[in-house]
Image (cartoon, rainbow, N blue to C red):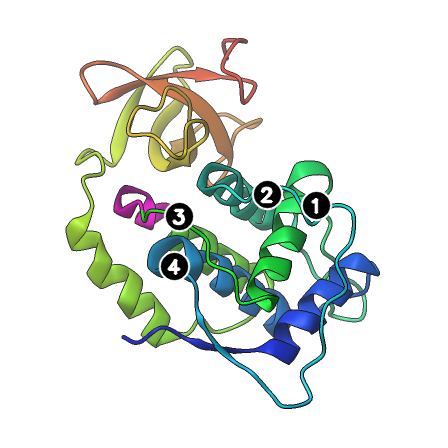
């Protein structure tokens, strides 16, 4: 599958919408998500430069360094915060460093500059889940060619073979599935993970709820926590 061709005008529209706090259409928001995932796995996309291309004006915060770990966390929060408003549009609701990561990335691409992000194939299942989750929340059909591309790249992944885990602690949460890393996205070692509950009798944490935890050395059991930092036991 070839690298996607991104219109410079599309990059300008994304940048402008975020900077002016304007709404995205669901398809535009998904295009932004796809652009970030593509860059993390395949490097810079090919840009189609129009003769009347609109140049993005540099702002004081375009100097923010774009990193793999921060972009991964940005995708995580884009999934966690995305929703449709009453007009069936989407607002880019991230702030702080994650807001700056996207603006800086779009600025870099608009200038034809290169990023130096090394692909991490171990995190592909996370990209698949983020993509399909956002599609579901925005009531969109995912791009089957893009999903097929991600599925094929899984062959290069060394993710944990065990996808179902037993829980140490609460007896009424019976089973959980690995969702993604939560820290050290750019490293092989990770301590904190996010899980989705697949079997539960707990009314506060029903099936489909997200929880945080640490995988134990046996790689089959998990200690659950109430907070992302994994400091408060559940």
Decide: marks 1, 2 in contact (CB < 8 A)?
Answer: yes
**Which badge, 1 or 4, is on the more N-terminal residue?**
4
Helix, strand or loop: magenta stretch = helix
* Image quadrant where residue 57 sits: bottom right
**Which badge, 3 or 4, is on the more N-terminal residue?**
4
Give how far apart the Cα atoms at labels 1 and 3 are. 22 Å
Q: Where does label 4 land, which residue? A: 43
**Which badge, 4 or 2, is on the more N-terminal residue?**
4
Decide: marks 3, 2 in contact (CB < 8 A)?
Answer: no
Q: Position of residue 112 (x, y in %)?
A: 53, 67
Q: Residue at x 15, y 53 (%)?
A: 155
Give how far apart the Cα atoms at labels 3 and 2 are. 20 Å
Give the magenta range: 120-126
Res 25 seen here:
no
Q: Secondary structure at mark 1?
A: loop
Would you say residue 62 sits in the magenta stretch?
no
Viewer-closest of 162 and 154: 154
Q: Where does label 2 land, which residue? A: 77
């Amino acid at each position: 599958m070839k690298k996607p061709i991104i219109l410079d005008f599309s990059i300008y529209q994304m940048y402008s919408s975020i900077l002016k706090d304007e709404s995205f259409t669901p398809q535009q928001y998904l295009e932004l998500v796809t652009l970030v995932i593509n860059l993390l796995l395949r490097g810079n996309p090919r840009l189609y430069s129009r003769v009347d291309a609109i140049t993005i004006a540099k702002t004081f915060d375009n100097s923010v360094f774009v990193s793999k770990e921060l972009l991964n966390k940005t995708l995580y929060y884009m999934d966690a915060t995305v929703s449709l408003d009453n007009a069936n549009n989407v607002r880019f609701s991230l702030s702080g460093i994650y807001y700056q990561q996207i603006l800086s990335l779009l600025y870099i691409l608009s200038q034809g500059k290169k990023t130096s992000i090394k692909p991490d194939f171990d995190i592909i299942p996370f990209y698949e889940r983020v993509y399909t989750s956002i599609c579901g929340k925005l009531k969109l059909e995912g791009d089957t060619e893009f999903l097929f591309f991600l599925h094929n790249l899984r062959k290069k992944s060394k993710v944990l073979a065990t996808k179902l885990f037993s829980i140490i602690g609460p007896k009424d949460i019976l089973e959980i599935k690995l969702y993604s890393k939560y820290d050290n996205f750019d490293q092989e070692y990770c301590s904190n993970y996010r899980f989705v509950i697949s079997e539960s009798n707990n009314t506060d944490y029903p099936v489909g709820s997200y929880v945080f935890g640490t995988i134990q050395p046996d790689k089959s059991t998990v200690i659950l926590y109430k907070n992302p930092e994994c400091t408060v036991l559940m």
